[in-house]
Image (cartoon, grey):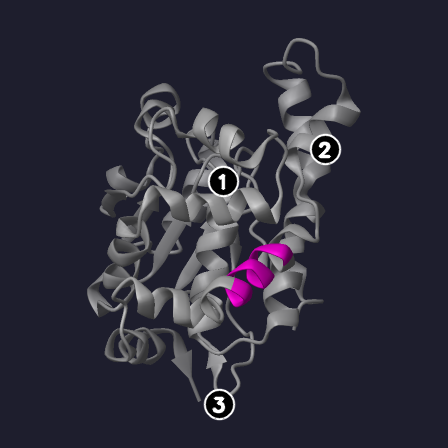
Amino acid sequence: MINDYSDRHHAFEGCFNFRDIGGYPAQDGRTVRWGRYFRAGRQDRMTAQDLEGVRQLGIATQIDLRRPDEVHEQGRGPLTDMGASYHNIAVIPEGGSDQLSRLVGDTGISGKRYLAYLEFGPESWIRMFEIFTRASSHPIVIHCTAGKDRTGVSTAFLLAVLGVNRAVIEADYALTNRDVARQANFIENTTGLPAGMDRESMMHAAGVPESAIGDFLDGLEERWGGPLDYLRSIGIGDATMQAVRSQFLEG
């Protein structure tokens, strides 16, 4: 299921990590529906050809995980102009990145840093799962700036609720690294690499350490008993989870 990267990845010219989570098997024998949930990076740099391609996906809802200052700087992208409803659910609030670094002790991406997202409170996940339950919200695109960290944690929560096994969740997360070279090429050829950053450091910044999502899941297991138990602890009950499964699973 993970090897079908070319089937799930939409190689837009100015948007990266845009991919479908369809086709993954759930433990109850069903599979995740194609064309219901797309995970992505920022879309404001899409080309005219990209816009035609994304229009064909019929996105009904854009869940934007960026901080308000990121949204202000980068823009929302084209989806609201195509009729999608827009929800800014900032997993990290303004000023939160510095707070995360103080909590974790460094600025690097890690499972420990992902766990620290939860210190900002449960509202993001509660709002997100309420949107997931509504048939009128589908298809959904969920994204942050790079489409790998906040988007990766959110997608891991959803896949866990859908009953997708951990190995597949971790493998889906690692697919981000397959689009790193394209992203580095785009930045190098358009705006140029950021000051003080060479191509190797750009590649590193755009990718993910493949162990991070596993460490995040381990942390959930140790503290709450797993992702589902964490979600239950913040008020996302079994009825909501069943409603989400009915929207995303087929077979």
Q: Give the residue type that dot 3 points to.
A: Asp
- Secondary structure at badge 1 equals loop
Identify the residue shown where x is 52% and y is 51%. Answer: 152
Q: Is residue 154 above or below residue 138?
A: above
Q: Nearer the viewer, mark 1 or mark 2?
A: 2
Q: Position of residue 36 (x, y in %)?
A: 39, 65
| Region rendered in magenta | 215-222
Mark 3, residue position: 28
Q: In the image as oriented, which residue stretches furthest toward the right?
A: 200
Identify the residue shown where x is 42% and y is 71%. Answer: 228
Numbered mark located on residue 204 in the image: 2
Q: Position of residue 190 (x, y in %)?
A: 60, 17
What main secondary structure does the magenta stretch of the protein show? helix
Q: Position of residue 63 (x, y in %)?
A: 32, 47
Report if residue 217 lies within the magenta region: yes
Q: Give the residue type that dot 1 points to.
A: Gly
The answer to whether any part of residue 7 appears in the image is no
Mark 1, residue position: 41
